[in-house]
């Protein structure tokens, strides 16, 4: 399969959208384009299984290389393994759901869908990149549309949030940039420097260079995924963004960071990852607990989900920092699971908000009686978030905990216990919000006049719920997809506790 | 010999021919401005095309004048930029009394830059430099009714004279210690002697004035603000670009033995320039002043690239200047159209610009993104390669400072994007009808911004030419 299609399809769709007239044409084209993305993503999965069963054991499949800037040995190099495919599938799901929930976008719809599709192009390119320059290129492609999406179509203090988000993410990519440049000048492949991910992974980067540049890369990517002291863009950004942008932000772009931490920082600088793992664990445990407790205090549904995202993304970093095969598999599963779940959560909040015009938990109540579908979705996603078995959240977090526990040192054990304990707090805020907003008596008479989800919203929700449940009850397929990839990363770090 | 003369000096001769044609038209005819502009732009187009035909390599007049593939390319870049500026200023020049004089001045500065680029001797270089800066002062004064414009001209000529003085002092000291003015003969005589380093510092200061490196940047903002937009854009891209080209080649060839000395100086100057340029750009409301400070910051980034070494340094600087010409002219193009049609030059006037002029807004936004270095615009590639060239020395402190300053620069570029798209405004700039010439110019800029980055052949071509240096 030609991976370029996954970059070209969103790009072409975005261009076609620009030449459409009126909301109807625009959204039809956008839906067709994102539907095509979803089909392509599944087709990719199918081809991948075919390829593997045909005995192709190479680390990356469907590789494509185009010599881009020859004097600097920069190539356009893409390829996928199981981890990438999992992320691509997640992206495709979130994109189509995002398009569907923006079905009646009335202001500047052309620009809106253009930016959404452009962002999705960046995400696909990022998840497939095997060259650090290509990777960085797509990382930044995915940042700027967010600024416009939040600033133009957002609500509340949107300009402030958009600027904060853009600057913090750009700051993150500036750090990543320094890290990548540092890596580049410490490589020596046939006498030349190289950005090629696979080639760099095969050579040993000097330890002092690793120790110097790992923090740059890890913190840089960490900012994208709400690493503890740099998480402040998350609540503002999510709460001001329009629904689809929140979904993209939490569902896709926070995952860019997690994927980067894993694929670039940990995979290419394994010794440093090992050396710094205690700090990573510390920060991510703080993020988990702090995020959970901060959520307790929130009264706005979007803020609740934003802070809980900080907590949930903490699990991703915890899994990465633990550096065992199971925990890294769990981290990737958590990325997929959290991506789907949080996109669904934001979609549900958006649906509620567009009807009731409030996101305050205190003002809501009894929604189950007037909008049963949306409320059910809300309950499902809440249960998934608190880690109920049968949904993806349980599977992912469980895998991370098992993986973490394999790391026998005291600090890691304590971190694992603390992280486990945070689930109780999660249950408190989720159950409280669900109970207040969805169950109970109807608090406002005008709620009675509101209608339930439309077909597009239903379709979006069903797709995402389908994803969550599929992972929840059949976790092994995702596990099997990811494991070879995480095994590679663990082999690189040279310490596999399972094997000890 | 005569053949050589015509082939090697081809670009200068074409320019000279155009100058004479203009003179003849001015004396013998009474053409309308419209017709004149058509003819002049056609001539400039011929000039651009002619520049690409038959590139030659060689030297004339005992190495006074030399040319090669790289120098020809640099001249071509300047030609293209001049054509774009000329197309952009259509609305402003259409009603100007002294249209042909404007072009004569502009072309003579361009001629001066060509001589400067081709110089193989400090005297020749100085001649070219003066020819390229004195007419610029007259051009800065071309908004004849505006006081600010005259003020800009006076400030420019004074600072320019002062910097030339510094440069000449440096040149004379250099002559005193080496006994020669020829570039090739100076190099072996450079021995890190204190007097030579002093001479070099003076020459560096002279250059720094011309490309407005902090702390020699004080004239920039005032001159940019007072001059007509066309002149501002000419100053900020063409004149700066030309001096930068020369600066790179002189540092890498003539002053190569002093590399340790100038590396530290460039390190300091680039950090200062980026930081000060960025911090001042944040507070500006006048669009031209804003672009002045943003261009100062850009020069800081270029200095980071120069602090590397050839050929990576040369290639990335030329590549960046090429991109910078297109991006900056994209921004200036919109500003000049708005300024010529409405007289508004403040960033706050651009609030809700998108509601009335969506296309112009996109052009401005994309140009600003390119200046900020956002992919997939060319600016991303330009900055990336500059910083790679700078990092070659292993100075990661410099690279980190530069990278973090890119974030600051994002803030002020995004601030304008925010005004255009997000801020409410009761009286936005009305819908503008843009004549075809500026439209073409904007289209060229957009095409440049998209193509130069993604199409790697251009970078590879520049790189292949700079290996020879």
Image (cartoon, rainbow, N blue to C red):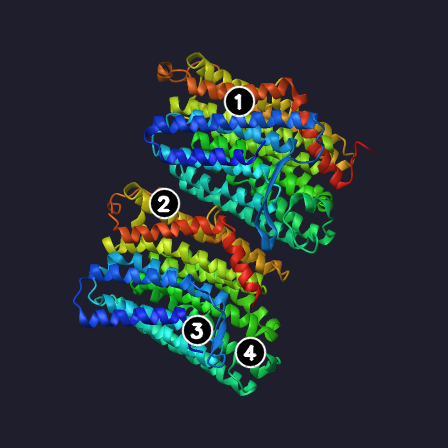
N-terminal label among 4 and 3: 3
Q: Which residue is mark 1?
A: A464
Mark 4 touching mark 3, by CB under 8 A? no
Which of the two discs, 2 and 3, sits closer to the camera? 3
What's the CA distance linking mark 2 and mark 3? 37 Å
User: Which quadrant holds the N terminus of chain B?
Assistant: bottom left
N-terminal label among 2 and 3: 3
Is disc 4 surrounded by few (<14), some (14 to 19) or many (20+) residues within 10 Å?
Answer: some
Whether labels 2 and 1 belong to a single chain: the reply is no
Using the image, determine if residue B45 lies above or below residue A447: below
Q: Which residue is mark 2?
A: B362
Which of the two discs, 2 and 1, sits closer to the camera? 2
Is disc 1 surrounded by few (<14), some (14 to 19) or many (20+) residues within 10 Å?
Answer: many
Q: Secondary structure at mark 2?
A: helix
What's the CA distance linking mark 4 and mark 3? 16 Å
Residue A492 in the image: x percent, y percent?
Answer: 74, 40
Using the image, determine if residue A245 lies above or below residue A394: below
- Judged from this view, the residue extending furthest toward the right is A500
Q: Nearer the viewer, residue A147 or A200?
A: A200
Q: Which residue is mark 3?
A: B116
Q: Which residue is mark 4?
A: B184
């Amino acid at each position: 399969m030609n991976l370029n299609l996954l970059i070209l399809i969103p790009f072409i769709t975005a261009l076609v959208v620009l030449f459409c007239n009126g909301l109807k044409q625009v959204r039809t084209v956008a839906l067709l384009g994102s539907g095509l993305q979803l089909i392509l993503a599944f087709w990719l999965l199918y081809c991948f299984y075919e390829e593997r069963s045909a005995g192709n054991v190479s680390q990356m499949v469907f590789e494509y290389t185009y010599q881009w800037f020859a004097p600097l040995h920069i190539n356009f190099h893409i390829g996928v393994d199981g981890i990438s495919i999992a992320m691509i599938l997640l992206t495709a799901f979130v994109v189509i759901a995002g398009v569907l929930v923006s079905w009646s976008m009335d202001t500047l719809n052309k620009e809106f869908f253009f930016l959404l599709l452009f962002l999705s192009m960046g995400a696909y390119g990022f998840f497939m990149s095997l060259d650090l320059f290509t990777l960085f290129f797509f990382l930044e492609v995915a940042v700027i549309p967010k600024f416009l999406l939040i600033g133009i179509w957002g609500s509340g203090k949107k300009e402030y949030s958009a600027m904060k988000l853009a600057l913090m993410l750009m700051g993150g990519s500036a750090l990543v940039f320094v890290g990548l440049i540092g890596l580049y000048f410490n490589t020596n492949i046939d006498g030349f420097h190289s950005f090629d991910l696979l080639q760099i992974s095969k050579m040993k980067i000097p330890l002092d260079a690793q120790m110097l540049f790992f923090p740059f890369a890890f913190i840089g990517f960490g900012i994208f995924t709400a690493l503890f002291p740099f998480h402040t863009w998350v609540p503002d950004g999510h709460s001001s963004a329009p629904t689809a942008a929140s979904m993209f932000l939490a569902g896709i772009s926070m995952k860019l960071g997690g994927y980067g931490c894993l694929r670039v920082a940990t995979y290419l600088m394994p010794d440093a990852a090992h050396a710094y793992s205690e700090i990573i664990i510390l920060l991510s445990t703080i993020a988990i607990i702090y995020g959970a407790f901060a959520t307790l205090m929130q009264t706005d549904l979007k803020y609740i989900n934003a802070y809980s995202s900080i907590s949930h993304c903490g699990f991703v970093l915890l899994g990465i920092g633990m550096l065992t095969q199971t925990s890294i598999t769990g981290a990737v599963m958590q990325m997929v699971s959290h991506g789907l779940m949080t996109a669904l959560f934001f979609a549900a909040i958006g649906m509620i908000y567009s009807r009731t015009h409030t996101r305050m938990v205190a003002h809501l109540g009894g929604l189950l009686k007037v909008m049963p579908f949306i409320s059910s979705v809300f309950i499902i996603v809440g249960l998934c978030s608190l880690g109920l078995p049968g949904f993806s959240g349980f599977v992912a977090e469980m895998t991370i905990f098992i993986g973490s526990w394999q790391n026998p040192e005291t600090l890691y054990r304590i971190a694992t216990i603390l992280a486990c304990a945070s689930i109780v707090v999660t249950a408190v805020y989720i159950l409280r919000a669900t109970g207040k907003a969805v169950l109970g008596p109807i608090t406002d008479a005008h709620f009675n006049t509101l209608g339930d989800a439309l077909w597009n919203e239903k379709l979006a929700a069903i797709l995402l719920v389908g994803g969550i449940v599929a992972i929840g009850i059949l976790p092994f397929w995702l596990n099997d997809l990811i494991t070879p990839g995480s095994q590679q990363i663990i082999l690189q770090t040279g310490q596999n506790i399972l094997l000890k | 010999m005569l053949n050589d003369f015509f082939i090697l000096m081809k670009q200068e001769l074409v320019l000279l021919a155009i100058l004479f044609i203009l003179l003849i038209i001015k004396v013998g005819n009474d053409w309308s401005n419209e017709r004149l502009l058509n003819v002049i732009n056609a001539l400039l187009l011929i000039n651009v095309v002619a520049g690409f035909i038959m590139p030659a390599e060689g030297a004339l007049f005992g190495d006074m004048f030399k040319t090669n593939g790289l120098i020809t390319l640099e001249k071509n870049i300047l030609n293209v930029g001049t054509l774009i500026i000329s197309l952009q200023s259509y609305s402003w020049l259409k009603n100007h009394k002294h249209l042909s004089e404007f072009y004569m001045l502009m072309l003579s500065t361009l001629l001066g830059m060509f001589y400067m680029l081709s110089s193989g001797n400090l005297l020749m270089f100085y001649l070219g430099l003066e020819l390229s800066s004195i007419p610029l002062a007259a051009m800065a004064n071309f908004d004849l009714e505006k006081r600010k414009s005259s003020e800009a001209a006076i400030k420019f000529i004074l600072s320019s004279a002062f910097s030339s003085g510094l440069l000449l002092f440096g040149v004379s000291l250099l002559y005193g210690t080496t006994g020669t003015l020829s570039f090739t003969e100076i190099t072996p005589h450079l021995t890190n002697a204190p007097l030579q380093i002093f001479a070099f510092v003076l020459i560096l200061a002279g250059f720094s004035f011309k490309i407005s490196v902090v702390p020699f940047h004080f004239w920039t903002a005032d001159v940019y603000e007072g001059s007509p937009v066309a002149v501002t854009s000419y100053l900020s891209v063409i004149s700066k670009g030309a001096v930068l080209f020369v600066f790179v080649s002189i540092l890498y060839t003539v002053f190569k033995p002093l590399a340790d000395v100038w590396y530290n100086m460039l390190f300091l100057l680039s950090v200062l320039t980026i930081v000060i340029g960025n911090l001042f750009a944040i507070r500006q409301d006048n669009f031209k002043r804003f672009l002045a400070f943003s261009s100062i910051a850009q020069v800081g980034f270029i200095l980071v690239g120069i602090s590397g070494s050839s050929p990576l340094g040369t290639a990335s600087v030329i590549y960046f200047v090429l991109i910078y010409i297109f991006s900056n002219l994209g921004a200036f193009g919109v500003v000049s159209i708005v300024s010529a049609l409405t007289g508004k030059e403040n960033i706050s006037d651009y609030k809700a610009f998108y509601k009335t002029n969506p296309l112009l807004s996109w052009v401005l936004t994309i140009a600003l993104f390119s200046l900020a270095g956002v992919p997939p615009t060319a600016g991303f590639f330009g900055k990336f390669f500059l910083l790679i060239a700078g990092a070659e020395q292993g100075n990661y402190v410099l690279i980190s400072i530069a990278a973090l300053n890119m974030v600051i620069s994002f803030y002020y570029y995004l601030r304008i994007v925010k005004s255009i798209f997000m801020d409410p405004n009761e009286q936005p700039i009305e819908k503008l009808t843009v004549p075809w010439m500026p439209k073409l110019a904007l289209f060229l800029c957009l095409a440049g911004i998209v193509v130069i980055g993604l199409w790697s052949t251009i970078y590879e071509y520049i790189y292949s030419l700079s290996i020879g240096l």
